């Protein structure tokens, strides 16, 4: 791709169209999933248990999915994952009880494991380091239509027809995305018929060994992992109960909850380009730190809110924060991971973070019921402010150091900047 002429090539545009269709489908029900579980007679504690159990399956699959992406190619991996995704929607529609939804979530985990590691890697490989944050900004701006269209559409269909008809419509959208992805994978294979790398245990072990060295080195990847890990734990502890809190404590309707999600995505869309520009011009650490700050402020407003306009303000500020930090975070992560390991790297990071945050929904349910519905959100607010410090001081650009010369029989160490 010639970055001076266009930030997005034709392949990347079709890639985005498929991602948008697939994720509109997901966003139609994901924010309302706790309420769907309650409709299937799940208690608050069982909702927390559901999200804890459903997080177990992706832990192993994320690493394998990233490795498959590195070996077979990004588009082929995404196409395979989408086929499993179609089956997951069948499970969502037909599930007779909340326990059966775990099967659908398991199939969805296969999809996520194969698609998620390829997403950032494919975009990174379609850009240069000089404009990478801006490319992520453009991509995520366009992608934000998912959250604007999906949640209100899903909420409207639920109120009009119920959960299962809504999930059927979402499944049709996802099937459309899968058809595009399969065609893209076939076209890519025809244009580049070179055989894919072998899926061997030695290949997997080699990739993991290189990544573990980077993770424990104390460099950029280490701090990205630690910061994102802490935030993931506390945000998952509270995020699961946002719709439950908004309905039972805030007194909002399902339609209003859908509009909050849409306002979040609108704010993200409005600021993604600015976030990407700021990261390329001033450094990723500036955009990320500003995003963390706005996250914390939005949570403070959320804790004090009792009316829809105040909840709306909280959601808009959170969206601005995400829009500022997201392109910068994606850009910084892609620079910290070597190109040949990006798929496995994204998979390993997601999997490792999942291990730490696995009990978070259950802990959030305990705090919600035993102490106060506000308790998990208060802890998340504190963490939002505390993580500004490592982001500001540890995510700064580092001066390049000359790589040691490789001598016969040896190889130079993998550069952390890729």
Image: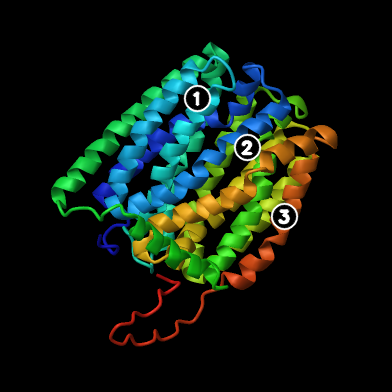
Disc 2 secondary structure class: helix
Disc 1 secondary structure class: helix
Viewer-side label of 3, 2: 2
In this view, the residue in front, 250 or 354, is 354
- Counting residues from the start of the chain, the first of labels 1 and 3 encountered is 1
At x 53%, y 46%, the residue is 268
User: Label 3, label 2: how many angstroms apart (C-alpha)?
Assistant: 21 Å
What residue is disc 3 on?
383
In the image, is residue 185 above or below residue 67? above
Q: Residues within 10 Å of mark 3 (few under 14, many from 20)?
A: some
Answer with left or right where residue 192 lies relative to residue 97: left
Residue 12: x and y in percent read 30, 49
Q: Which mark is residue 153?
A: 1
Q: Which mark is residue 401?
A: none
What residue is disc 2 on?
52
Answer with left or right where residue 206 lies relative to residue 149: left
User: Label 1, label 2: how many angstroms apart (C-alpha)?
Assistant: 27 Å
């Amino acid at each position: 791709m010639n970055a001076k002429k266009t930030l997005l090539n034709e392949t990347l545009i079709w890639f985005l169209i498929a991602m948008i269709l697939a994720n509109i489908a997901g966003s139609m029900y994901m924010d309302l999933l706790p309420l769907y579980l309650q409709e299937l007679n799940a208690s608050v504690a069982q909702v927390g248990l559901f999200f804890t159990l459903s997080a177990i399956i992706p832990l192993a699959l994320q690493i394998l999915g990233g490795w498959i992406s590195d070996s077979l190619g990004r588009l082929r991996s995404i196409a395979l994952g989408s086929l499993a995704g179609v089956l997951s929607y069948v499970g969502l529609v037909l599930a007779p009880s909340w326990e059966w939804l775990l099967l659908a979530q398991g199939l969805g985990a296969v999809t996520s494991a194969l698609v998620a590691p390829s997403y950032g890697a494919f975009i990174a490989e379609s850009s240069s380091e000089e404009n990478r944050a801006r490319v992520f900004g453009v991509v995520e701006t366009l992608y934000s239509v998912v959250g604007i269209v999906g949640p209100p559409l899903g909420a409207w269909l639920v109120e009009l027809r119920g959960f299962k008809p809504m999930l059927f419509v979402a499944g049709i959208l996802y099937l459309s995305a899968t058809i595009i992805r399969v065609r893209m994978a076939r076209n890519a294979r025809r244009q580049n018929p070179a055989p894919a790398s072998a899926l061997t245990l030695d290949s997997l072990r080699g990739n993991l060994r290189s990544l573990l060295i980077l993770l424990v080195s104390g460099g950029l990847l280490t701090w990205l992992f630690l910061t994102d890990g802490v935030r993931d734990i506390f945000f998952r502890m509270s995020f699961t109960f946002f719709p439950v809190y908004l309905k039972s404590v805030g007194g909002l309707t399902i339609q209003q909850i859908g509009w909050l999600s849409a306002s979040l995505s609108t704010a993200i869309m409005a600021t993604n380009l600015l976030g990407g520009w700021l990261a390329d011009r001033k450094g990723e650490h500036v955009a990320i730190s500003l995003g963390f700050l706005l996250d914390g402020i939005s949570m403070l407003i959320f804790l004090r809110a009792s009316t829809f306009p105040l909840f709306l303000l909280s959601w808009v500020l959170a969206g601005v924060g995400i829009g500022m930090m997201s392109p910068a975070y994606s850009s910084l992560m892609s620079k910290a991971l070597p190109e040949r390991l990006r798929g496995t790297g994204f998979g390993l990071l997601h999997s490792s973070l999942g291990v730490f945050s696995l009990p978070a929904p259950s802990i959030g349910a305990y705090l919600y019921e035993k102490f106060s519905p506000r308790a998990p959100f208060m802890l998340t607010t504190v963490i939002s402010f505390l993580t500004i410090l490592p982001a500001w001081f540890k995510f700064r650009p580092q001066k390049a150091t000359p790589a040691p010369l490789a001598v016969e029989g040896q190889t130079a160490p993998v550069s952390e900047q890729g």
